[in-house]
Amino acid sequence: MRRLARGRDDFDLALRGWFLSGTDKPVLEEHRQAADRIGLNLSQRMLTLNLSRRPPKHLGNSANGRSSSGPKRSRPRAAATRCPMK
């Protein structure tokens, strides 16, 4: 479980570093190290995020993991999003 939490932390730090790299704010060494650990190039201009087609199970209010609010969709949205930044 700790490895999973570290992976999430590394992803968060690396993503923050990627967003910062397109600004005048400094990218910290911890951002660079996290990016190296997950294999993210902070200098690339485009980022591809592979998103899940289903919401995480822990976000639901009911026993089956679905939220009781909001519309129900019959088909999931696209699984990948391209995000050009710089």
Image (cartoon, helix red, strand yellow):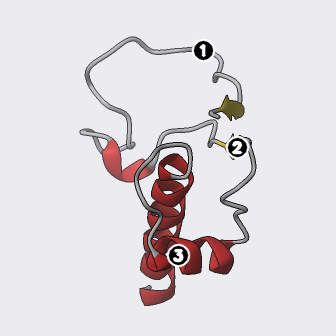
Q: Which amino acid lies under the numbered mark 2 shown in the image of this protein?
A: Leu
- The first of marks 1 and 2 along the sequence is 2
Image point (56%, 53%), residue name? 18
Residue 37 or 65: which is nearer the viewer? 37
Q: Nearer the viewer, mark 1 or mark 3?
A: 3
Circle 1 residue = 74
Q: Quadrant of residue 69?
A: top left
Tag 1 and tag 3, C-beta contact below 8 Å? no
Residue farthest toward the bottom in the current orientation of the protein: 2
| Residue 2 in picture, x, y percent from top left | 42, 88
Quarter containing the C terminus: top right
Residue 47: mark? 2
Q: Which amino acid lies under the numbered mark 1 shown in the image of this protein?
A: Ser
Q: Nearer the viewer, mark 2 or mark 3?
A: 2
Cα–Cα span, label 2 and label 3:
18 Å
Q: Which amino acid lies under the numbered mark 3 shown in the image of this protein?
A: Gly
Looking at the image, residue 65 lies above or below residue 25: above
Looking at the image, residue 6 lies above or below residue 25: below
Q: Quadrant of residue 65?
A: top left
Image point (64%, 80%), residue name? 37
Looking at the image, residue 9 lies above or below residue 79: below
Circle 3 residue = 7
Image point (45%, 55%), residue name? 16
Cα–Cα span, label 1 and label 3:
32 Å
Local crowd at mark 1 within 10 Å, few (<14), some, or many (≥20)?
Answer: few
| Residue 51 in picture, x, y percent from top left | 63, 41
- The first of marks 1 and 3 along the sequence is 3
